[in-house]
Image: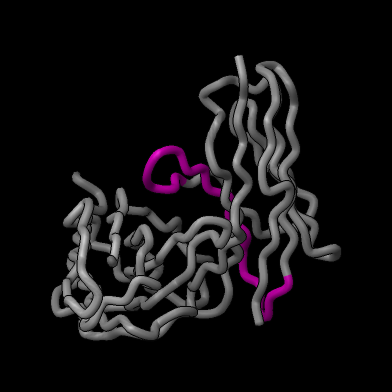
Amino acid sequence: NAGVTQTPKFRVLKTGQSMTLLCAQDMNHEYMYWYRQDPGMGLRLIHYSVGEGTTAKGEVPDGYNVSRLKKQNFLLGLESAAPSQTSVYFCASSYTPDSFRFTDTQYFGPGTRLTVL
Amino acid sequence: EDKVVQSPLSLVVHEGDTVTLNCSYEVTNFRSLLWYKQEKKAPTFLFMLTSSGIEKKSGRLSSILDKKELFSILNITATQTGDSAIYLCAVEVNGNKLVFGAGTILRVKS
């Protein structure tokens, strides 16, 4: 099992360019999440998905879009990159099909370091 | 607004020391509190706490939750250089979402 993988690992963009970050998991997890991590601010939830075909906004969704067309993949898009989106992006997944259960552990990917000039 | 605050922000100790990391929270609909260790890349899971007063232990690491005073501590005894990392506290709220604190940067000197 590869667990949670992310591509690319690094990317440099110019302001206004677009890109898509890909997250893939092979654990058959229902829930998937995108976070960004900035110095001194911990991880902040951008968007998440509770199943194939569903997405929802997290704490800092502005400037990002997501899609979950297949259960194993969760894509994060930046339509028009801004320097404020320079960050490290982490994808995570967890099982948790039942909202009355305590959450299963979230498993994190290795991260994507994005710089917007 | 849900909030998780960790202290100290950073800490430098010598090998063999014992450290205590703190996490306090103010959230609606608390479900659980989690601790993660982050070295160079992805955070890795340490503990999940759901009940007050029950210590969870794994080797030299232990953690406990106080739901009345809304905080948790993570203890590391006999620290080693391999314990150097960022320690993240997160609280699960409704919808299986995690709210993270800013983290504590621990550096263990040999």
Q: How is the image coloured?
A: one colour
Which quadrant of the figure contains the C terminus of chain B?
Answer: top right
Tally of marks: 0
Which quadrant of the rendered structure holds the N terminus of chain B?
bottom right
Residue B29 point in image, percent of width and height: 65, 79
From the viewer's perspective, tell me whether residue A38 is left or right of residue B20: left
Q: Is residue A64 above or below residue B40?
A: below
Quarter of the view holding residue A73: bottom left
- In the figure, A92 relative to B10: above or below? below
What residue is rendered at 45% in x and 79% in y?
Answer: A60
The question of residue B52 being in magenta is answered with no
Q: Percent from the top left, x then y, of residue B39?
A: 45, 38
Q: Residue sitting at 32 percent across and 69 percent down?
A: A32
First to last magenta residue range: B26-44
Q: Which one is in front, A116 or A60? A: A116
Q: Position of residue A108 (x, y in %)?
A: 36, 53
Magenta span contains residue B39: yes
> Which residue is drawn at the image coordinates 40% and 68% (left, top)?
A96
**Residue B70 location in percent, x, y?**
79, 64
Comparing A53 with A46, the one in front is A46
